[in-house]
Image: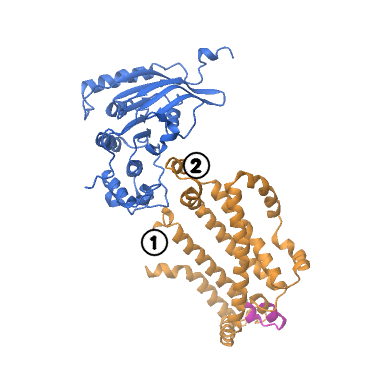
Chain colours: A orange, B blue
Amino acid sequence: MRHWRITPWIVPLLILLAWEASSRTGWLSSRILPEPLAVATSFWGLLVSGSLLHDVAISTGRALGGLAIGGGLGLVLGLLTGTFRSAETLLDTTLQMIRNVPALALIPLVILWFGIDESAKLFLVAIGVFFPIYLNTYHGIRAVDAGLVEMARSYGLQGWPLYREVILPGALASILVGLRFSLGLMWVLLIVAETISAQSGIGYMTMNAREFLQTDVVLVGVLLYALLGKLADLVARGLERRFLRWNPAYLGATA
Amino acid sequence: MQRDWIAPPSAGLGLRLEGLRKDFGRRPVLEGLDLDVAPGQFVAIVGRSGCGKSTLLRLLAGLESASGGTLHVGGAPAAARRDDVRIMFQEARLLPWRTVLNNVKLGLDTPEADARARDALAHVGLGDRANDWPCVLSGGQRQRVALARALVHRPRLLLLDEPLGALDALTRIEMHRLVESVWRELRFTAVLVTHDVAEAVALADRILLVEHGRITLDEPVGLDRPRERGSAAFAELEGRVLSRVLGEVGRSCDPSPAPALAGW
């Protein structure tokens, strides 16, 4: 089965080789793209000096903080509007209107409200991840099989036990899809927020490097975002595999 | 095998329905239905689709409330007997995120729940599938789990809403045998809704035909158990009931305005 594990990496590897070759032959100027080896060297240098880990830790903290606030609110409100017709009537129209405003369009306002400190970044990430989780939670709850709910009621389940045993598990697949969307958006919004203004973090590192024409460091930043995005995706998939074990789509994935 | 979960003999509940009515909006579905069922009897209700037989079952299960008339189960209003009544639906309706065993344990809040559920599973021949997910079971196996889930509550009235309708012919005959054997052993009252007259003749003590919201045929089944599907008496009865059901051909089943409503 080894060759199956390698297959996804063939294309990235070929791209890397072509890139190195065109840098070596001088076809690509290092002002535009430094050779991969230089990127690796500066990655190593930043890692050893500790500044890389510091910046990654800061960025990750911001991303997760925003996710916790926005995702948490989205989950709670989605559960509310999905479960109670009155909450839906009261809140859903408002939320749907706000949803159509791109989070990035709020940047001028965010800067006016929060200045350029931490809360501005948290706010941007939180508002971006809120909607995927809210919408998917709401639809997940609404889409729970009414036949299962009726069956559970006829077996004497109601109130919280009914919610815990039938409604929440039924909505979970949809909620996790929302989480996966949010994890992708989370990094996008953080990059923008950190690029606008920051005194630390990966965005700060790359903007700082740009000032000094350090394209290799800029690339290290870009690659870090790619790696962190992939990591977030892996976490989301792990959660799906853990919580949706019963689903035929995941049965093969667990031993 | 341990059989401590089995209800004591003659545990079945009698039914008494008087003038039972159910309207959906302005459309009457059941129009003053009277019925007495003795404890422990196996009753089959046949009829064309849309004639109210499923609605009758859902009223008995407490899933709908009647628009008029009375419905007594074991001498008490149906609402007070909900714990003694269990229903099997057309689909198994297993929770896909619970294992087979945990599906059977649903709503069972006793310390010996686990042992009882395993016992019920063994009873329907699925003792070795306790830890499987429902999605890997066949349709027939899922209905067996649903049957175990109903039995584990020691029901005194078991309602069957065409639970075998979606199964293939062979699995169906197997399930008939299983349902009959647990019914004979546990002596609950059973009400089976079906569109399959052969199924009704194979299982029931008594066959009722529902047409236009009323019972228009009440046919006792005198055949000895276990019943021979090929026997002449079986075929004769099946033919008689079937032609009675089909006798309605040409007349619509839908709100064929009852005389009382003709003035509208």
- Name the kind of residue labelled 2 in the image: Ala
Residue A48 is left or right of residue B176, and the answer is: right
Residue A116 is left or right of residue A170, and the answer is: right
Chain ID at mark 2: A
- Give the residue number, with chain letter if any, for mark 1: A254
Residue A203 spot, x, y in % from top left: 66, 75
**Depth check, front residue: B102 or A245:** B102
Q: Alpha-carbon neighbours of circle 2 within 10 Å: few (<14), some, or many (≥20)?
A: few
Looking at the rendered image, the quarter that the N terminus of chain A falls into is bottom left
- Residue A38: which quarter of the image? bottom right
Whether residue A193 is in magenta: the answer is: no
**Depth check, front residue: A14 or B103:** B103
**Residue B52 seen:** no
Q: Is residue B111 above or below residue B160?
A: below
Residue drawn where x is 51% and y is 70% of the image: A11
* Magenta segment: A206-219
Which tag, 2 or 1, sits closer to the chain's start? 2
- Give the residue number, with chain letter if any, for mark 2: A146
Residue B230 is left or right of residue A21, and the answer is: left
Residue A93 is left or right of residue B172, and the answer is: right
Labels 2 and 1 in the same subunit: yes
Q: Is residue A220 above or below residue B118?
A: below
Residue A9 spot, x, y in % from top left: 48, 70
